[in-house]
Structure formats: structure tokens, C-alpha cells
Image: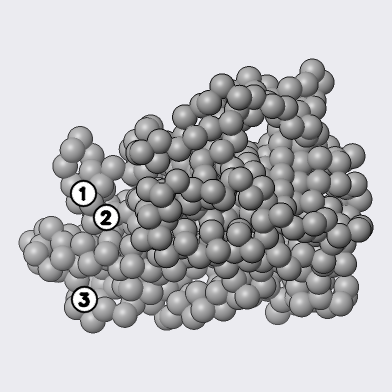
Amino acid sequence: MAADGSPAPPSDGHPLRVAVIGAGPAGIYAADALTRQTALPVSIDLLDRLPTPFGLVRHGIAPDHPKMRAIRDTLHRSLDHPLVRFVGNVEVGTDLSLEELRAHVDAVVYTYGAALDRHLGIEGEELPGSLAATDVVSWYTGHPDADRATVEAALAGVRSAVVIGVGNVALDVGRILARTAAELEPTDMPQHVIDALAAAPVEQVTVLGRRGPAQATFTTQELRELGELAAATVLVDPADLELDPDAEERAATDRNASRNLAVLRGWAGHPLPPGHIPLRLRFYARPVRLLGTDRVTGVEVERTAVDGDGRAVGTGEFEVLPADLVIRSVGYRGTPLPGLPVDERTGTVPHDGIGRVLRDGRPAPGEYAAGWIKRGPSGVVGHNKHDARETVAALLADAGDGTLRVHGDRDDLVRTLRARGAEPVLLEDWRAIDAAEQALGASRGRARTTLHERAALLAAVRAAAQAG
């Protein structure tokens, strides 16, 4: 605050206070970009509604991907920075309003992702046995908000599973369903997840795509892993891989598509070894309704073709696939934070193209967005780094030209939260959770077992505090 009481530029004594809402990759990369710059002094509170950091790295990447999940070791280095304070177990809109948060800081960066699933919009979608991939992924990664009862009821007795979608999440779900108990045992899944998956008598898994293999959005690395399962074999209809010359030419210019096609063609016409379950990849198949009365019994699909604009068009040829479990994986969308505008069509926060939040069509001073809530659910974890840097560059430009200024001394956010009865989880508390998960894993011969209940996570924090 300047001598006359007006906002002042940041200084060593009064750094620019930034709250980053969402401690997933986008939020951590934004915090990292702020600490790496030297143009102005900053202090950063990295907020998350969960008691744990890392977002989709913890609760999105499949547990049988330990190398991918190890990226959290890299992200952890940003949490250790002295200018960054992790503040978990705090929900904006419940523990404090966005307006109240803004009173504690000079700028807010929204990086809380896109957590809602998109619906198919077809008949029978609400039948028991029909699930969103978001629900299944939350369950098998040990998310505290996972609906364990619903997922496990849907999984019980399943013999034929259909996954709708051809992105990486769809492949993750199909692969997890096709894993043997021995393959799942070394992972950090909660024990009840391993037990439920081991008990499910899955005999076949089908992954459906509305368009052709050249339009699939999964990555080649993810695709290849399907060929490494212990007791499941990928089956692909060679006819699905026959592209017309124009489609073949377009696919050749897309490195990911051409690599995917090469992998798929290597599997085409594979025999099914004795004792293996089939993991079928079906293309040009659009679900039109789910069948069943008390629960899902099948999926009616229409054969499609891809037109010159890359859209799936129906051919009028229908068939029914047996299924007692259907999991839709057709995209994510962001949810509104109380007090923050979200575009209903895109599920993203309106912004100026580089991260400044727009209200009534104009940049809102001190408000920024990064990650999926900014650009939509696209790309892999690493894409958030460039995106976060772009947003931070806009913030720094605003601080440089005086648009963004320091508003003087304010109450400490954590002190205020505790006075209200909230239980914020700080970095040392997270380390207690981390140690408890490693100890639980060691007791079962694993590197880690995820604590899935919020009460158990907070109990680990309290136990460490009492012991210390």
C-alpha cells in the first residue's frame, strides 16, 4: 500500500500475493512459473479442496502406470519452494467465498480442472450398470469423493464390459478391467479396489469408437500397453483399418494417427490364445441406446462412416452388443466455482486467449485461468506447463504495467480458515499422509497403498501432529 493509501507495486516487504485454486499439474506449474521469474516479489498459496496435492496425477492417471504417476516427484519440488504454501482440504465456496479469498490476496489463478463427465444423451444411459469413466477412475485411484457403493455394485458379476470412447482414459479403463489380480496387486490401488476387480468375472471387454482409427485421440504409448496384458489379447477387425485414399493421406500427415494405425494393423486378425479374454477395439460404431430393464444388458450401435469433414455419419446398419457394464468416456467439462463464470457450452472459464478471465466481455483485474478450466480437457500432463507459463506471463505483464498492484497488509489466509473451524492441510501434513500411505503399502509388500477416505487422510495428519 502506498503512503496515500492507494495500491502500490509489489516490493520485497509487500510481495504480490497470489492464490492458485487447484493443486494439480496446471496449478503447480503456475506456482513454479511464478517462483522462477525475477521481475517481482511474490508469495503463493496453492489451494485444493482435497487434503492431497497433484490432482489428476494422483486421481486420474491409472495406478498401473507407475512411471507416469512418478511425475508427482517432479511436481513435489515446486511444493517445497519457500515462496509456495500448499493449503489443502479447503473448498472455495464452502470454507470461504471467492469474494472473501480475493480480500486476502492480490490475484487468483483458477486451475481447478474439469471434473464433470459428458453424457451420451441416449436412451437407457441412466440404467444401473451404466457409469461414467470419471466415477470409475475416481474409484480405482482412491479419490475421497468416489461413489464406492455404486461402482462396486455395477462391477459385481460383470462378464461383458463395453467402454465408449477412444481416448487415453477409455483405454485406461478397458486395460484395468482386463488385468489379472496378479497384475493389479503391486499397484497403489486401495485394497478394496483390487479385491473387487479380482472378484469380477470379466470375460470380454470392448472399446467403442464412433469414428475410425485415424480419428482416435489416444496416444500410441497408451495403445501399445494393451498388447502387454498377461491374460488378455487385443482383437481388431481388419476391415476397420481399411481407409479410403483421402483418409489414408490425411492420417499420414498426423504422426500420432500414423503410429496408431501401424500398431493396430499389427494386431489385426490376431487369434485369441486359450485362456485369454478378448479386448476388442471397435471403430465406426455409434451407440444409439442402452438396453435393459433393471440394469444394462446390451448396447445397440449403428455402423458409421466418416465424411470429408471428419464427422461420423450413420449408415442405417444396427447391431446389439451384449454388455452388463457400460462405461462412457466421452469427455470432461468444467464446473462453475461459486462467483466465477463458466461457459455452459465449453465448460471453460471465459478468457482473453492467454489466461485473463473475462467478466462481461472484459478482463477482470487480478483473475486468471490455466489448465483444463482454461482450454478444455485436452492434451497430456506436460501440456499444462506451457499453458501455465502463458497465463503467468499475462499476470506478470499486468503487474508490470500497473494493472495489478499490492493492496497492503491483510490477515493470513490459514489463520482465518482455522478461526472458522476449517482444517487446512499444509505441506508437512501432506508429508504425514504420504508416510502413512507408504507404511500401509509396505505392510502389504507394495511401495504404497492409497488412503481413499478423507477421514483416514486427516487421521494420518492428526496422528503425526500428536506424535510430533
Residue 40: image tag: 3
Q: Is residue 26 visible?
A: no
Residue beneath disc 1: 352
Q: Are marks 3 and 2 in contact (CB under 8 Å)?
A: no
The residue that appears at 28% across and 42% down in the rendered structure is 350
Quadrant hosting residue 222: bottom right
Q: Mark 2 packing: few (<14 Cα in 10 Å), some, or many (20+)? A: many
Element carrying mark 3: loop
Please state the horizontal and vertical placement of residue 146, each as a whole percent of the image: 69, 46
Give the answer, above or below, for where 356 lies relative to 439. Answer: above
Residue 19: image tag: none
Quadrant hosting residue 385: bottom left
Q: Amino acid at mark 2?
A: Gly
Of circles 3 and 2, which is in front?
Answer: 2
Give whichever of discs 3 and 2 has the lower sequence position: 3
Q: In the displayed structure, does residue 71 sit left or right of residue 457?
A: left
Q: Are marks 1 and 2 in contact (CB under 8 Å)?
A: yes
The residue that appears at 86% across and 50% down in the rendered structure is 196
Of circles 3 and 1, which is in front?
Answer: 1
CA separation, marks 3 and 2? 19 Å
Q: Is residue 123 visible?
A: yes
Instruction: Work out which quarter of the rendered image holds the N terminus and state it.
Output: bottom left
Please state the horizontal and vertical placement of residue 31, each as a whole percent of the image: 38, 70
Tally of numbered discs: 3
The residue that appears at 53% across and 61% down in the rendered structure is 260
Q: Mark 1 packing: few (<14 Cα in 10 Å), some, or many (20+)? A: some
